Amino acid sequence: MHFSPLKHCRVCGTAVVYRLPDDGDTKERAVCPACHTVHYQNPLNVVGTVPVWGDDGAQVLLCKRNIEPRRGKWTLPAGFMEMGETTAEGAARETDEEAGAQYEMQGLLRVRNVVRVGTGHLYNRARLRSTSDNPGAETQEARRLDEDEDRRESEDQDRDPERSAQELGVRQPTPRSSAAGRRSR
């Protein structure tokens, strides 16, 4: 994918030039000829969880997005990592904000690189402690996927939730609604 080049210095507003920086870097960067700031364009971290339920982890909790991009589509609870937080803290915050689930955070499950949009995705496994969820404003609805149920609803999505879970190495389930409840971690 081609990324939009930076045109002006973020410090002083002068038009930048693309060249090798004087510090020995081997990649062309946006360099300000006025204040000499070197601007780096780096990928963003997306952090989240794969919240599982059941002794064998056969159910996975997904959230139906209430915001763009992809409003109305199913996703795992995840979002951009904030400054000052660890990847696990960011995953916990996103799970709280989007799913309002009661869970126990477990270890890192999967890292995915999405080069075309400049992101790295880090997912922790989270063991759900309850079937009660309290989705936040960014989520229309939270559901569990269960492999024993009919797949018709998930197949109506242009990118169904099964595929996201399957790509993360989670069993292939289908959606089942979860009851609303209190949010706690």
Image (spheres, grey):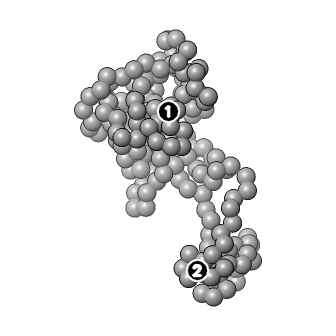
Q: Is residue 20 above or below residue 103?
A: below
Residue 27 rendering spot, x and y as whole percentages:
73, 70
Q: Quadrant of residue 144?
A: top left
Q: Which is nearer the N-term, disc 1 or disc 2?
A: 2
Q: Nearer the viewer, residue 54 or 91?
A: 91
Instruction: Say which residue label 1 marks.
Output: 72
Q: Position of residue 93 (x, y in %)?
A: 37, 47
Q: Residue at 26%, 38% (x, y): give it.
A: 184
How packed mark 2 is, by other alpha carbons closer than 10 Å (few <14, some 14-19, many 20 or more), is: few
Query: Can I make out residue 170 in this image?
Result: yes
In the drawing, does residue 82 fall left or right of residue 164? left
**Cα–Cα gap, marks 1 and 2:** 39 Å
Q: Amino acid at mark 2?
A: Gly
Image position of 120 with respect to 28: above or below? above
Residue at x 69% of width, y 59% of height: 3
Instruction: Tell me which amino acid carries mark 1.
Output: Gly
Which residue in the protein does label 2 denote? Answer: 13
Res. 92 in view: no
For label 1, the SS is: loop
Decide: few, some or many residues near mark 1? Use Cα within 10 Å; few <14, some 14-19, many ≥20.
some
Q: Nearer the viewer, residue 107 or 77?
A: 77
Residue drawn at the location 59% of the way across and 51% of the way down: 119
